[in-house]
Amino acid sequence: MTSDRRRPDVDALEFFGAPETDKLVLVEHDPGWSSQFVAHAERIRSVLGDIARGLHHVGSTAVPGLAAKPVIDMLLLVDDITADEDYVEPLVAAGYVLRVREPGHRLLRTPERDVHLHVHEPGDPEVDRLLLFRDRLLDDAEDRSLYEATKRELITQEWTHMQEYADAKDDVIALIRSRARD
């Protein structure tokens, strides 16, 4: 990660807005998700220019054939995570909503809650983990099936917050990442 930060990063998790409890649903893969990613990527690049060092479609909607929550997960890379004025403010002006600020990570989303924009710096280990996992699911049918079966099982349970559902997938995600590294 960069050492030329304008200021120290936040040292605690900050939430913006009221807690949200959406009903979790899985839907079959929608080929239109890739064009939605492209449209949002163009929108983001148009407001950020060179500040957007990279944009990637990550998460289940990036994997053809994989059932997913109908939420496009995007990964935005910026050189200085602490320079919120360079990227958060323009993205908010373009209609995105800041939801989370935590060390090394920002999360914005659309008001419709159909896009989650995760912001990290190049070199952040989480970037490699996200891309490694996505690429493994793209390349390995067995792990893709395992992940989908896990999600289908978990979606039947009651969750107070979406993060609980996400956390419940941690073990299978770690297993798949381990296989990808081997």
Image (tube, rainbow, N blue to C red):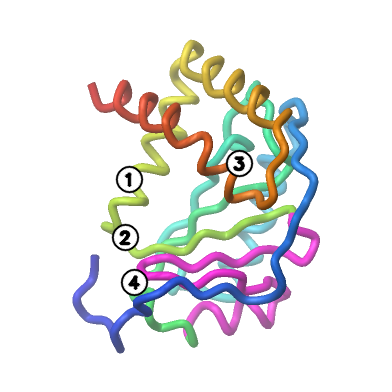
For label 3, count other residues whose C-alpha is less than 10 Å away and answer few (under 14), some (14-19) or many (20+): some
Q: Is the Cβ of the residue at disc 4 closer than 8 Å to that at disc 2?
A: yes
**Please, what is the three-letter code of the amino acid marked with disc 1?**
Asp
Could you tell me which secondary element the residue under label 4 belongs to? loop
Kindly report the distance in space between the C-alpha atoms of the residues bearing marks 1 and 2: 9 Å
Residue at 29% over, 26% down: 178
What residue would you read off at disc 1?
Answer: 128
The residue lying toward the viewer, choosing from 31 and 9, is 9
Is label 3 or label 1 in front? 3
Mark closer to the chain start, 4 or 1: 4
Magenta highlight range: 86-113
Q: Amino acid at mark 3?
A: Tyr
Q: Circle 2: is it few (<14), some (14-19), or many (20+) Cα within 10 Å? A: some
The residue at which mark 3 appears reads as 165
Q: Give the answer, above or below, for where 62 lies relative to 149.
A: below
Q: Is 134 on the left or on the right of 158, as rendered?
A: left
Which residue is denoted by mark 4 in the rendering? 79
Find the distance from the CA under tag 4 to the CA under tag 3. Answer: 31 Å
Q: Earlier in the sequence, mark 4 or mark 2?
A: 4
Q: Quadrant of the N terminus?
A: bottom left
